[in-house]
Image (tube, rainbow, N blue to C red):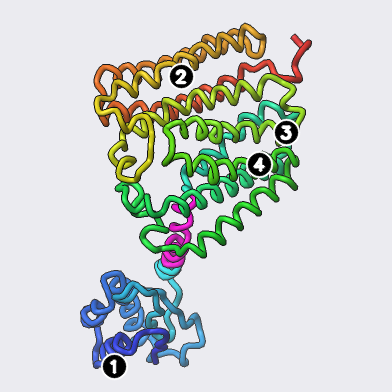
Amino acid sequence: TVAICSIRPSSAAVCCRSICSSRMGPSSFSQDASRLGRSSVRLLTTSSRQLCASSSAGRSDDGGSRHTRTSSLLIQDPDGVAAKAIVGRRVRWTAFERLAVISEQLRRTKARVAPYWSLSKGKLTTWIALSTLPGYALMCVDGGSFVAAMSLTVGTGLSSAAASTYNQLIEAPRDARMRRTHNRPLVNGTIDRSSAHQFAALCAVGGVSLLAMGTTPTCAMMAAGNIFLYSCVYTPLKTVTPYNTHIGAVVGSIPPLLGCTAAQGMSAFCLPEPFVLFAIQTLWQFPHFYALAWMYREDYVRGGFTMFPVFDHTGWETADLMRPYLMALCILPLATSAFNVTSYMFVVSSMVPNGLLLWRFTQYDQNPSIRTARTFFRTSLVHILALLGLFVFHCKGPYTEGTE
């Protein structure tokens, strides 16, 4: 006896013919099962072997009251639509069957989530959410609160996802003309505009609400303002003036301040530490983005975006743009130590990440190419993590004055 469900009529007929044929073996079952698709063969072959073993063993027992169970496997049909396969009566669940079901469920979940991950620029959003933690760690009292830290990161991530979605809604026609962005979900039709609007609104409301309830109202208001600044100011300016990068640098430097205000509210701005974090993040973003824009300058031209590096065909003008910000990053530890914000060890330890970044910049300056620009871009990601971490470690802190 065989249970058949949720299979197309043609597929079910193939399976029934195989099962009803006399002396059915795994090989004949697999030949007919191959019509269901390559991913189905392994599961159906396993099922047929179990069915044959169960049929031969079933002649000598009492009708299958012991250790028997009807099971169901999930397979994929030729059209890529998951359906339930055939398993004989008296077939036990095996570890392979359970793993196959779990794997199929995970594949379906990933297929549903992936477009929204792309819509929210998942990697960038994760990066932005984590960049709030240095400010929170620096300003919190008595180790802070785990609930507040989680509310900060998740709320910031949702707010970033909302801003990224609004950005793609505005730029979808231009994204379609660029090689780097032509596969985004709004361009290829994976997600319609109505669903994207709903997703953005849900993320914006959820993120700001979570920050308001889990941290401070100041943090929530800054996050809401940053969503507006990114989607309604920075995004439209990308096609108007190359100075849009300066607005984008401000937007990208707000997350560390969210961490500060999550711990201390508005009073955080009475201290120098948040301004140093803001300066580090702002100065770093210019060379980081200029390297990216120069690598994809042809794409930006196709999309109609106006960036300084898109007019530079040699790469030397871009290097000249990057140099002042890199020099300022190297001088900043001296200033923080001179004003007693950090210990002198910040000057010493920051030489390592700053020296590494300057070395990569020198390679690009001497030989501008896609390879050297990409190397500098990737190195800058390691650099900002190290520099922020060292600043937090060597910062004397607003609550340690008079203790040394």
Let me know if residue 106 is in the magenta part. Answer: yes
Rendered residue at 49%/26% (across/down): 384
Give the mark, 3 or 2, whose residue is nearer the N terminus. 3
Where is residue 95 drawn, in percent x and y?
43, 66
Any mark on residue 325, and which? 2
Q: Is residue 314 visible?
A: yes
> On the picture, is 20 further left or further right than 2?
left
Where is residue 373 drawn, in percent x and y?
31, 28
Secondary structure category for the residue under label 4: helix
Q: Nearer the viewer, mark 3 or mark 2?
A: 2
Give the mark, 3 or 1, whose residue is nearer the N terminus. 1
Give how far apart the Cα atoms at labels 4 and 3 are. 10 Å
Q: Which residue is mark 3?
A: 263
Secondary structure category for the residue under label 3: helix
For mark 1, does the 10 Å Cα neighbourhood hold few (<14), some (14 to 19), or many (20 or more) residues? few
Let me know if residue 210 is in the magenta part. Answer: no
Q: Which residues are magenta?
A: 102-120
Where is residue 252 drawn, in percent x and y?
53, 34
Is 159 rendered above or below residue 362? below
Secondary structure category for the residue under label 2: helix
Q: In which quadrant is the N terminus drawn?
A: bottom left
Give how far apart the Cα atoms at labels 2 and 4 are. 29 Å
Q: Nearer the viewer, mark 3 or mark 1?
A: 3
Please report contact status of discs 1 and 2: CB closer than 8 Å, yes or no.
no
The amino acid marked with disc number 4 is Leu
Q: In which quadrant is the C terminus drawn?
A: top right
Give how far apart the Cα atoms at labels 1 and 2 are. 76 Å
> On the picture, is 325 further left or further right than 199?
left
Q: Nearer the viewer, mark 1 or mark 4?
A: 4
Q: Nearer the viewer, mark 1 or mark 2?
A: 2
For mark 4, does the 10 Å Cα neighbourhood hold few (<14), some (14 to 19), or many (20 or more) residues? many
